[in-house]
């Protein structure tokens, strides 16, 4: 994997939102939805950095399991 692509639904306000980080691209969504996607990607990027992992170190399946663990942990808090 080389980048995370987070895509929101088309916004009724007609604004096309795009935010990029080192490992992700967030596009579209309402203002609120885009912010949630962006924050999630930032959190994942920070966890990768803290763990010493690079996105390229993970297969798509490994990344999916890793993100699921992160999300389950977030829900428990």
Image: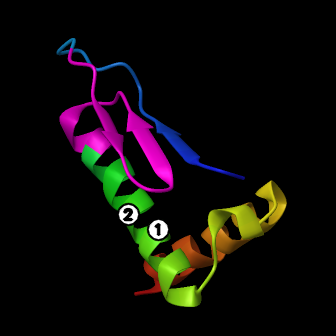
> CB under 8 Å between callouts 2 and 1?
yes
> In the rendered structure, does residue 28 fall within the stretch colored magenta?
yes
Q: Secondary structure at mark 1?
A: helix
Give the image location of residue 66, x and y in percent.
68, 73
Q: Residue at x 20, y 36 (%)?
A: 31
- Residue 15 lies in quadrant: top left
Q: Which mark is residue 45?
A: 1
Q: Secondary structure at mark 2?
A: helix
Give the image location of residue 67, x and y in percent.
62, 68
User: Is 58 displayed left or right of 3 in the figure?
Assistant: right
Residue carrying label 2: 42
User: Is 11 displayed left or right of 25 in the figure?
Assistant: left
Q: Is residue 48 above or below residue 6?
A: below
Q: Residue at x 40, y 40 (%)?
A: 26
Task: Indicate the quadrant containing the C terminus: top left, top right, bottom left or bottom right.
Answer: bottom left
Q: Is residue 3 above or below residue 14?
A: below
Query: What are the residue bounds of the magenta stretch?
Result: 15-34
């Amino acid at each position: 994997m080389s980048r995370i692509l987070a895509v929101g639904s088309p916004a009724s306000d007609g604004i096309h939102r795009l935010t990029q980080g080192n490992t992700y691209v967030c596009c579209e969504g309402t203002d609120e939805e885009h912010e949630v996607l962006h924050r999630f990607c930032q959190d994942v990027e920070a966890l990768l950095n803290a763990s010493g992992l690079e996105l390229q170190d993970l297969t798509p399946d490994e990344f999916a399991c890793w993100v699921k663990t992160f999300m389950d942990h977030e829900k428990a808090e």
